[in-house]
Amino acid sequence: MINIPLSKPIIGKEEKHEVMKVMDSAILAQGRKVLELEKKFSSMCGSKYSLAINNGTAALHTALYAVGIGVGDEVITTPFTFVATANSILMCGAKPVFVDIDEKTYNIDPDKIEQAITKKTKAILVVNLYGLPADYDRIVRIARKHNLLIVEDAAQSVGAKYKNKISGNLADISCFSLYATKNIMSGEGGMITTNSKKYYEKAKLFRHHGQDQNKRYYYSGLGYNYRMTDIQAAIALVQLKRLPWITEKRQQNAKIYSNSLVKHNNLITPYIPPDRTHVYHQYTIRFDNQSPITRKRFRDYLNKLGIQTNIYYPVPLYKFRHLTNNAKIEDFPVTEKLVKQVVSLPIHPLLKKEEITYIVKAIQTFSSSNNL
């Protein structure tokens, strides 16, 4: 029976070998491998500093703390993302303020940001959804005009570029996830990058209970145990070496999809602005002007053929009770539209060419039979 999963982590001989080397060394917690990963990650992003964290949510929490987000502050962000983005704001005692998204890129709409700024606004938390960077030039201009900080949620965009500047070096501080399904992974893990020594030092203390590394059991303030282990770092180091190949394979797979599906009038394939590159953490299509019933039939049809799909994301964050901030649905027409239309297809680099061909033919058959 055919089974094509939506995502599939790459776990090769080299990853296993490096993990066993760490196990044999008996240095399992944060050590030399973590330091090596931090140096190589900084080099990859072109940032001065890099900090390894135990997961992506912890990276966001730490980054927001490092730039000074606290109780009573407001942080502008997108409602069309994974909940960790907004939860990390709450974890600092601040309030997420949601802004509608751009219909083509699915990222935060710069045209809507200024009207959401108040005296309490401290930062803009920008998400590079599905692996495509947001419009940073415009967002930076707005932020500088209003003296706001920018935090880059690059959880899905490792290796992506905006105007030849790589993700992880597009904001005051940036955060990555190395969760098992991400483009590169360590099982669980995260990274922070920045060019600010001040933010780096604050984040480093926060990662380790606020403890001064030169004076053990002396604490500068509140901190958490957000350290990465050498086992995680060993996996991530191998994955980092694979990143160019992983990115190329995802882009090749996306090109096959787009070239094959673009002729179907009511199927909208991903849009890539000319000034940036997409690394396709997800390959997401849309059913334009179709009801959610059509999307459900589509997913059921592919599922019966052994093709896994998913919806990222079916419910906007402003609809969840713990994130409710008196948002009015009429302020989010694009988000309300897209949550009913998007569906993501398998795009991982381990897909075989015949599997992509199989998926494309299945979509074309469904589209023809449903007059799409």
Image (cartoon, rainbow, N blue to C red):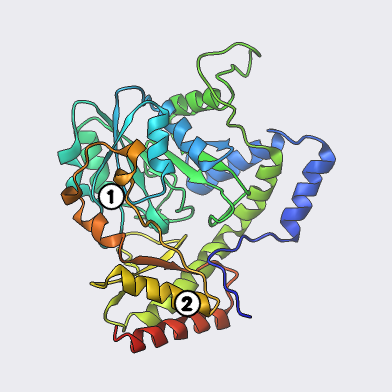
Q: Position of residue 331 (x, y in %)?
A: 17, 48
The residue located at (26%, 72%) in the rendering is 288
Task: Name which residue type carries label 1.
Answer: Ile
Q: Secondary structure at mark 2?
A: helix
Q: Position of residue 129 (x, y in %)?
A: 38, 54
Query: Which residue matches tag 2?
Result: 302
Q: Quadrant of residue 105?
A: bottom left
Mark 1 vs mark 2: give the one in front: 2
Query: Which residue matches tag 1?
Result: 108
214 relative to 137 in the view: left or right = right
The residue located at (43%, 27%) in the rendering is 65
Residue projecting furthest to the right: 24
Residue 217: mark: none
305 shown above or below 46: below
Q: Secondary structure at mark 1?
A: loop
Q: Quadrant of residue 89?
A: top left
How dense is the environment of label 1, judged by Cα within 10 Å: few (below 14), some, or many (20 and up)?
Answer: many
238 shown above or below 364: above
Q: Earlier in the sequence, mark 1 or mark 2?
A: 1
Q: CA distance from mark 1 to mark 2?
A: 30 Å
Q: Quadrant of residue 239?
A: bottom right
Q: Position of residue 368 (x, y in %)?
A: 34, 88
The residue located at (64%, 36%) in the rendering is 35
159 relative to 120 in the view: left or right = right
Is 186 in front, or is 312? 312
Q: Position of residue 356 (x, y in %)?
A: 51, 79
